[in-house]
Amino acid sequence: MAVYTSLSDSDMRALVADYYLGELVSFQGISGGVENTNYFLITTTGKYVVTLFEEFDLDEVPYFLDVVAHLKHKGFNVPAALIDIHGERLREVNARPAIIVDCFPGSELKQTDVTSCRLMGEALAKLHIAGEDFPEHRDSHRGVAWWHKTSNAIEVELEPQQAQLLMSQIAEFDAFMAEHKDLPKTTIHGDLFFNNTLFEGDKLSAIIDFYNACHSWAMYDLAIVVNDWCSDMTTGELDMTKYRALLKTYLHERDVSAEEILAWPYMLRIAALRFWLSRLEAWHGAKHDPVRLAQQHDPLEFQRILEARVRYVPALV
């Protein structure tokens, strides 16, 4: 279970007492996450989620809360932080920044299908359009600077073939971007895997977990989604029916430029590399701790996706 900061019954009661949420009924740690600690919280007024941020200091969190508030104002079903009795949305609990958000109806997908991919393409395009006028422009904490630093640090841990794949793809991306510095950017989710959405039947009920949000390339965010939603994780290959369904609805809602079309193969590859690299970093960081190692996602999934995108990338349009 990915609960890095434990909360006692008295901790949770003290937290609930500072919100307009009635009385504590029960709470339970949420498994599945690898970056933050999350608890389901049930009170006499409803069901909520408590998030404790494990990677950010208190002064870093407001950006992510502002992104969500902006998107909520635009009409998206997203988990905006609740305001406590002191008029604050962010507090410290056991020395970690913490928020409480509404728990939306619906559940995580066990796997994607053509219908969910179609809905995601439409929602993602609308999210990118909505993010264009968000005024704060924050670079990703796992963006270009991070993957340069992390790849250099982890290269010695890899097999020669892995290291060559990693370093060559970063070099190819850098060379492309040096010639295309004005590629369109917007506020992106940055981690919109299908387990960061909730569905009620065939309806997308919420988009959650905006803690990798940043100001970056729209095509990069689209590539993150395509790699997760449309790939066979056992082979890395794209399911072309899902791929076409997702892109059709995305492109119906948002026009892409000729430069974005040109960038598409590079974005698919670097998006795969980013998650391969973050999983490698987490795996190697936890390899001497069996409990934490068991909580990590398999890096080989995104190595296979990257290798598949090196072999072949279908056209964007």
Image: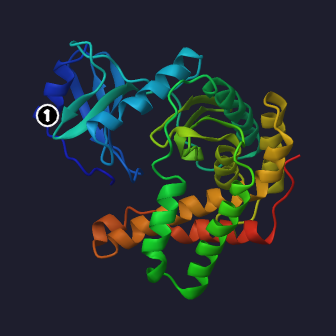
Residue 41 to residue 8: above or below: above
Which quarter of the image is occupied by the N terminus?
bottom left
From this view, report whether residue 262 is shown above or below residue 67. Answer: below
Q: Where is residue 191 shown, x and y percent of the image? A: 54, 46
- Is there any visible trace of residue 104 in the rendered image? no
Tell me which residue sits at (67%, 66%) in the image. 305
- The residue lying furthest to the bottom in this view is 160
Front residue of 249/265: it is 265
| 284 horizontally vs 22: left or right | right
Residue depicted at x 61% and y 70%: 303
Residue at the extreme left: 10
Q: Is 198 or 163 nearer to us in this picture?
A: 163
In percent of width and height, residue 46 lies at: 35, 20
Q: Mark 1 is on which residue type?
A: Asp
Q: Can residue 309 be seen in this view?
A: yes
| Residue in the picture at 74% in, 50% down | 180
In this rendering, is residue 132 above or below 277? Answer: above
Q: In which quarter of the image is residue 131?
A: top right
Q: Residue 212 placed where, x, y %?
A: 48, 43
- Residue 282 falls left or right of residue 9: right
Toward the viewer: 129 or 229? Answer: 129
Report the residue at 39% width, 73% height from top: 284
Relative horizontal placement of residue 272, taking residue 146 as reference (left or right): right
Q: Which colour scheme is used?
A: rainbow
Helix, strand or loop at disc 1? helix
Q: Which of 205 and 68 is in front in this view?
A: 68
- Check disc 1 and report the residue beneath it: 11
Q: How crowded is mark 1: few (under 14 residues within 10 Å), some or many (20 or more)?
A: few
Quarter of the image holding residue 276?
A: bottom right
Residue 71, given in percent of the width and then of the height, sits at 55, 23
